[in-house]
Every structure is written in C-alpha cells, then in structure tokens.
Image (cartoon, rainbow, N blue to C red):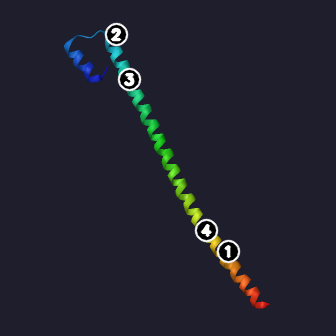
Amino acid sequence: MDILVTNQYAREKTLTTDEIVSALTTFVKQTTHTEMKFQNHQQELITQTEKIQLQGQLKHRKVMIDDQNERLIMNQQRLFDQETQLR
C-alpha cells in the first residue's frame, strides 16, 4: 500500500493498530526493496567504472609496448646495418 494512499485512507477512517502496523510494514518493505535495488545499481556502476578504467590502462600499456617494439626493431636494423658495414 502506498504511503499516500495510506494517509488518504487514514483521513477517511479511523485505522486499527493492526491496519497501521500492516501499512507501515508494507512501506518499510518497499523502502528496503528500493534501497537494495539502488545499492545493486550503484555496485553495477562501480564495476562498470572499474572495467572502463582497466580497459584504459590496457590500451595505454599496449601503446607503450608497441612503441618499445618499434624501437627494438629500429635498433635491430641499425645493428644489422652496422654489422654489414663492418664486413
């Protein structure tokens, strides 16, 4: 039962203690369920953010490795050229 409906119903009729407890229990359950859904969404967002950060780190590392590989290839070629000149 929605709290607004409960308030409107309370104005129209005197509620028994059981009815009030029932309405409040329902309200607490709905609030707890909403809070749990919020926490789940929040955790999903944190997980997605962490994945995005890791993907960014991996891309950066790949670029660094590619640059190092390119330098190694250039150094190998230079050494080969020097070796050829010495012969």
* SS type, badge 3: helix
Q: Quadrant of residue 62?
A: bottom right
- Amino acid on which the number 2 mark rests in the picture: Asp
- Image point 24% across, 20% down: which residue? 7
Callout 4 crowding tier (Cα within 10 Å): few <14, some 14–19, many ≥20: few
- Amino acid on which the number 1 mark rests in the picture: Leu
Q: Indicate which disc residue 18 carries.
A: 2
Q: Indicate which disc residue 28 carries.
A: 3
- Where residue 11 appears, x then y in whole percent? 20, 16
Q: CA distance from mark 1 to mark 4?
A: 10 Å
The quadrant in which the N terminus is found is top left
Q: Quadrant of residue 8?
A: top left
- Where residue 21 appears, x then y in whole percent? 35, 14
Mark sitting earlier along the chain (1/4) = 4
Name the residue beneath numbered marker 1.
Answer: 72
- Amino acid on which the number 4 mark rests in the picture: Asp
Q: Are marks 2 and 1 in contact (CB under 8 Å)?
A: no
* SS type, badge 1: helix
Callout 2 crowding tier (Cα within 10 Å): few <14, some 14–19, many ≥20: few
- Where residue 51 appears, x then y in whole percent? 53, 50
Q: CA distance from mark 1 to mark 3?
A: 65 Å
The tally of labels here is: 4
- Where residue 74 appears, x then y in whole percent? 66, 78
* SS type, badge 4: helix
Mark closer to the observer (2, 1): 1
Name the residue beneath numbered marker 4.
Answer: 66
- Amino acid on which the number 3 mark rests in the picture: Val
Depicted 45 relative to depicted 6: above or below: below
Mark closer to the observer (3, 4): 4
Q: Are marks 3 and 4 in contact (CB under 8 Å)?
A: no
- Image point 46% across, 36% down: which residue? 40
Q: CA distance from mark 2 to mark 3?
A: 15 Å
